[in-house]
């Protein structure tokens, strides 16, 4: 319904068209004035600190929408990091195994993997895309033992991958918590509640059962995987002992420490790689073009560093226990993906042992976190 009309030139004082109010428009305007007065009176009668809910409902919902949107974005970011971490890890393990099947020089391959990571971090420091660490002789001395343990753990893992199926290596590596608990007790004097140690039993039993029924079992693959577990456990022990004085340095982020360790590990492994591979091996494989072999070789090296970089991004956005659970899930995905891709034959007892070991790893992570949370309360 129209509430006004345009008057003609005869009703214009200045010869221009004007709006002329109708009786209905005047009545509406009077009603609005009355409502405004009632609202002011109602507001004046409210006690101090009280508000009319009908007038604040929209603003309250708008305010609550902001943290919800922020939380949703954070969840999406964490999910993206974990998804990318899993994807890169699976692709790395498959391509790494294919490379070793074509070109069996694990010492040289593991060396170049460290070298690619060292180069990647060095370039970022030089061009300023990553904050440079404050490097001193004292820091390099403190990193020597952790870097040596990392070198040993990395090359032993690569040797195991070259000897047995990927799935079996990862099953054996799920026993790393056993070595971590023993080394922490022996060298750091750290003791956990009894229920934490109980979770190590299914890990040991599962790995033993899986090893006894593994079709691709070799002592070389088993022993090197076990040495890798010991080396990485000692890396954590050495880091706690030697790096205590550098915790307050804001430039020594996890990513920067990993970059420095990669550089030092590369230099440490170099003479051993040259010795065990009789110099620098030619990139030649029977029936495989050089371009194909080189593509697999460099992809393996680059993926090795990228999945480690992404793992630190994931770790920086979640709690340690969430990361431990995610790491357990990652191992399950790698084992399953490698079995499907390489069509690895597994025995029923082998599968049962794998499940028991992985479940034990999960229970260890959860119980260790529970013990850490209970410790401040009892102190």
Image: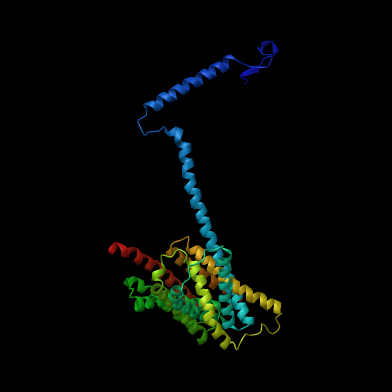
Provide residue 126's location: percent of width, then percent of height: 57, 67
Measuring 28% from the left and 64% from the top, which residue is drawn there? Answer: 378
Residue projecting furthest to the top = 10
Measuring 56% from the left and 73% from the top, which residue is drawn there? Answer: 118
Provide residue 62's location: percent of width, then percent of height: 49, 41
**Residue 50 in view of the camera:** yes
Q: On screen, 41 above or below 217?
A: above
Residue projecting furthest to the left = 379
**Residue 349 in view of the camera:** no
Mark count: 0
Provide residue 172's location: percent of width, then percent of height: 48, 78
Question: The N terminus lies in which quarter of the figure?
Answer: top right
Provide residue 261's location: percent of width, then percent of height: 50, 74
Q: On screen, 69 above or below 328?
A: above
Residue 334 image-quadrant placement: bottom right
Question: The C terminus lies in which quarter of the figure?
Answer: bottom left
Observer-nearest residue: 300 or 338? 300
Residue 18 image-quadrant placement: top right
Observer-nearest residue: 245 or 192? 245
Q: How is the image coloured?
A: rainbow
Measuring 70% from the left and 79% from the top, which residue is drawn there? Answer: 290
Observer-nearest residue: 83 or 37? 37
Observer-nearest residue: 95 or 299? 299
């Amino acid at each position: 319904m129209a509430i006004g009309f345009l008057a003609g030139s005869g009703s214009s004082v200045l010869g221009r068209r004007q709006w002329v109010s109708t009786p209905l428009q005047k009545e509406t305007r009077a009603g609005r004035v009355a409502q405004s007065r009632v609202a002011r009176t109602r507001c004046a009668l409210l006690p101090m600190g009280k508000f009319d809910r009908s007038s604040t409902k929209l603003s309250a919902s708008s305010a609550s929408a902001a943290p919800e949107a922020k939380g949703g974005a954070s969840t999406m970011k964490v999910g993206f990091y974990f998804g990318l971490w899993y994807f890169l890890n699976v692709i790395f393990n498959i391509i790494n195994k294919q490379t070793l099947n074509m070109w069996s020089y694990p010492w040289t391959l593991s060396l170049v993997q460290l070298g690619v990571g060292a180069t990647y971090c060095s370039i970022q420091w030089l061009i300023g895309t990553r904050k440079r660490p404050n490097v001193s002789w004292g820091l390099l001395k403190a990193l020597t033992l952790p870097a040596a343990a990392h070198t040993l753990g990395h090359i032993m893992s690569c040797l195991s991958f070259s000897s047995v199926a990927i799935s079996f290596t990862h099953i054996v590596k799920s026993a790393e918590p056993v070595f971590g608990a023993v080394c922490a007790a022996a060298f750091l004097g750290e003791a956990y509640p009894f229920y934490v140690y109980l979770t190590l039993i299914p890990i040991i039993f599962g790995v033993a059962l899986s090893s006894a029924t593994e079709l691709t079992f070799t002592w070389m693959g088993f022993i090197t995987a076990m040495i890798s577990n010991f080396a990485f456990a000692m890396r954590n022990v050495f880091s706690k002992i030697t790096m205590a004085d550098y915790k307050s340095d804001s430039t020594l982020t996890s990513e920067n420490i990993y970059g420095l360790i990669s550089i030092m590990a590369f230099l440490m492994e170099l003479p051993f790689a040259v010795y065990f591979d009789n110099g620098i091996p030619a990139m030649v494989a029977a029936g495989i073009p050089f371009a194909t072999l080189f593509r697999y070789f460099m992809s393996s090296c680059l993926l090795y560093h990228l999945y480690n970089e992404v793992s630190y991004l994931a770790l920086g956005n979640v709690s340690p226990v969430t990361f431990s659970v995610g790491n357990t899930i990652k191992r399950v995905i790698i084992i399953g993906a490698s079995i499907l891709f390489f069509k690895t034959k597994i025995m029923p007892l082998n599968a049962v042992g794998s499940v028991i070991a992985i479940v034990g790893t999960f229970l260890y992570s959860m119980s260790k976190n529970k013990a850490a949370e209970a410790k401040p309360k009892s102190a």
